[in-house]
Amino acid sequence: MQSKQFPPQQESRLRRTVFAIAAAMLAAACGSGDDNNGNGSNPNTKPAYIGTVTINSYNGSSDDLLTAGLGKDGLSSATAPLPANATAPTAAELRRYAIYANYRAIVDTTAAGGYGSLYGPNVDAQGNVTGSEGKIAGVEYLAYSDDGTGQQNVTMLVQIPAGFDTARPCVITATSSGSRGVYGAIATGEWGLKRGCAVAYTDKGTGAAPHDLDTDTVPLIDGTRATRAAAGKNAQFAAPAGATSLADFTAASPHRLAFKHAHSQRNPEKDWGKFTLQAVEFAIWAINDRFGAVSANGTRQRSLDKDKILVIASSVSNGGGAAVAAAEQDADGLIDGVAVGEPNLNMPPDTGVVVRRGGVQVLSSGRTLYDYTSTANLLQHCAARTTALTQSPFYDNPTTAPFFAARCTTLAEKGLVTGANTSEQSASALQALHEAGWEPESDDLHPSLSAFDTAAAITVTYANAYAQASVTDKLCGYSFANTLTDLKPAAIAPAALASMFATGNGIPPQPPSVQLINDLDPTHGPYLNLVSVSASTGRTDLNYDGADCLRKLLAGTDATARALQAGQALTLRNGNLRGKPAVIVHGRSDGLLPVNHTSRPYLGLNRQQEGVASKLSYIEVENAQHFDAFIGLVAGYSNRYVPLHVYLNRALDAVYDNLTTGKALPPSQVVRTTPRGGAFNTPAPTLLPSNVPPIAATPAPGNAITVNALTVEVPN
């Protein structure tokens, strides 16, 4: 199939698109395109995998696409738009709550952090600050993509703004971040909506709302809940059973929750690229459903096909990784360009790519997510007690400190760290993380990431997903449940369950409603993982045994380990972006998805695959980390970190300008930002444009990132 043609500098794609649209309109006016029976020669056929479509219109006042009627001020308000009846929210209430919660989960919504001045609904596409609340009228198309079983049911959503311009048609993808639901990248979709682009969203086979095994209720596509029997094939997720039936499992282990990413037994990550491409195809169908010419017999035509619609694949984190996967898999030329932030990219083994920083080869690079996260799950809690980090956020948390110290003791006994006391052992653990590929710029993040138990949450979820384990398997002795004051599994509150479509992140724990449970605690029985006892040590060391079990699956030889390894192999990237212009932005301080294992080696892999034809630019941002939302929420973050979201928007601008005007992409480089500063744990000064300088069209030699043969050279 013929690929899209891109304009040289002197002839923009915009001009050619206008001519093409005009020709199509003329043909429609003259009756051209109809067959002899007036049926139309190019009908707008809905993709076969798309089920029943629901279309909703939003007036841009009481409700809208971007803010669900809340506006800029409503999104930043600490007062959430709670449903009127907490145990029986309506679909409209859940949508509003989901947009509110997911927007705030991705960006810092404090004015001092740049919201409302450098980004946000009131900042227009050209970067001008307006008095608007940023509400955008338009329509939403909502449907499942399914393979006919009712077990896949990947949510697809297309937003088409009222200002969509058929003379300059464009689409951006906003695949959900993390394991969130379909609105999980609404803050990315904002860029497209402001430019009049349609936005193609998908939850990529994950989702925030669980199957509650106690009540046997499941989420539907709109977030409302039904019994599994009543939902049938319309369930967004219903957990399949393993060797044990769900009923028998629940009788023996009550109050457990199953989540789609972990427990669907489909390893959804292997298909994140496919689902993102399907979202684009659904968007093209939806656009033509609204704007396609109508033939003599009333058949809607595909007047705006992929050759006329500019498509940029975008999103952040897992959604960014999905966008890259889609571009690699795009054999039909649906995607024109890529602009992503902090993408989750699993490198294949033995690529030969070398990463050097300041002329010195980094100690470890190109490891997979499961590899480095299971490493963090062992070491990070202990490293968080290093005395060098006493001024780091959450270092002085009295609740977690004793358990972190106990983990250090266990690691020393197991020979994984050295030292005679917690201080020496934690320093050894921090050095081990450096040797495993974490940059020193991530050090200050280890206490807070450990307090939030991010490594355990991710490792447990991905172990289950890759191994295609059932919720009934309780892989490595873990399960998910609510707990009460006795710290044992308990029934989840009906109101919390009813709203989890909106409030959940799809990767527990998410206190207080969902916790990680150690089902193998020899002292208490099933118990809150954080304070549980390890059988091999007899101490409360954050369930070392579970973390060790998860880590050993990576190289194990039993059936579960082999299944996990096979599942992981299906998620590796190949580095071939098929000549598409692309910009990746990533924070140098990222402690969750370290740059040495993701964006840096991917730059080398892409050059290995595409050579001089590569159009990938990699922008590494100093003083940026993975969770922009934490900047305004966690004491100490605002003093140290700048929002990466600013640079995602600039990456989208750069790719859009390249595609529409031929403007050159900025070369790969390090952007030297300036933290807001201020005393530790005090409010930081207001973020100014000078704190987040632009991406340079010509970076200074000391900022340029280069690729020589298979070596990626990153300056200090």
Image (cartoon, rainbow, N blue to C red):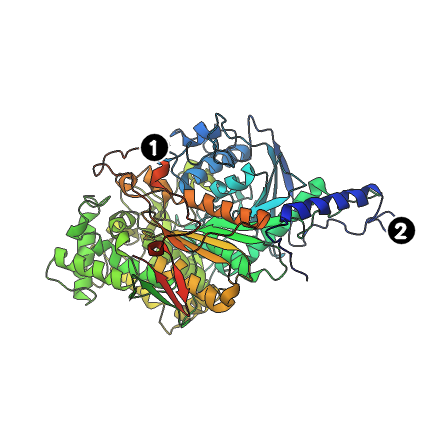
Instruction: Residue 285 in the image: state x and y as whole percent.
Output: 67, 47
Q: Residues within 10 Å of mark 1 (few under 14, many from 20)?
A: some
Label 1, secondary structure: give it. Answer: helix
Instruction: Residue 100 in the image: state x and y as whole percent.
Output: 45, 35
Label drawn at residue 36: 2
Label drawn at residue 429: none
Left or right of residue 47: residue 39: right
Dots 1, 2 in contact, CB < 8 A: no
Q: Earlier in the sequence, mark 1 or mark 2?
A: 2
Q: Residue furthest front?
A: 10
Q: Residues within 10 Å of mark 2 (few under 14, many from 20)?
A: few
Give the image quarter of residue 549. bottom left
- Residue 419 versus residue 153: which sits nearer the camera? 419
Q: Of the residues shown, which amino acid type is indicated by label 1? A: Ala
Label drawn at residue 112: 1
Instruction: Residue 635 in the image: state x and y as whole percent.
Output: 26, 38
Closest to the camera, between mark 1 and mark 2, is: 1
Q: Of the residues shown, which amino acid type is indicated by label 2? A: Asn
- Residue 223 versus residue 605: which sits nearer the camera? 605
The Cα atoms of the two marked residues, 1 and 2, are separated by 64 Å
Left or right of residue 231: residue 625: left
